[in-house]
Image (cartoon, grey):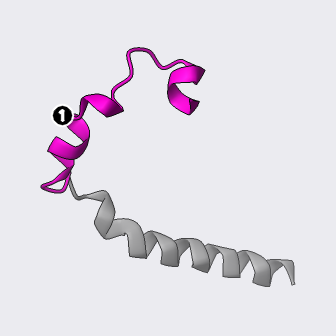
Amino acid sequence: MRRRALLAAALLVLAVGAVYRAALDNGFHFDDEPSILQNDRVRISAPTPQALWG
């Protein structure tokens, strides 16, 4: 039973990895740069807990 559960978990991990594999090689989408990189509202001056989680 334990071997069957491990096999099922391994197959699930492989299936999820196969689905998301194509997304890992892609760069920013055409609208990401102005929406994220050039947006002053999403910038923080220091990564403090207050700045990250409000």
Q: Dot 1: few (<14), some (14–19), or many (≥20) neighbours within 10 Å? A: few
**In the rendered view of the protein, which quadrant contains the N terminus?**
bottom right
Q: Residue at x 32, y 58 (%)?
A: 24
Above/below status of 51 relative to 10? above
Q: Callout 1, which amino acid? A: Gln
Decide if residue 16 is on the left or right side of residue 22.
right
Q: Residue at x 57, y 32 (%)?
A: 53
Seen from the viewer's position, the closer of residues 16 and 35 is 35
Above/below status of 8 relative to 42? below
The image quarter in which residue 34 lies = top left
- The percent coordinates of residue 11 (x first, y second) are 59, 79
Q: Which residues are magenta?
A: 28-54
- The percent coordinates of residue 33 (x first, y second) are 17, 43
**In the rendered view of the protein, which quadrant contains the C terminus?**
top right
Decide if residue 9 is on the left or right side of residue 31.
right
Total labels: the figure holds 1
- The residue identified by callout 1 is 38
Residue 13: in magenta span = no
Q: Residue at x 48, y 20 (%)?
A: 47
The image quarter in which residue 49 lies = top right
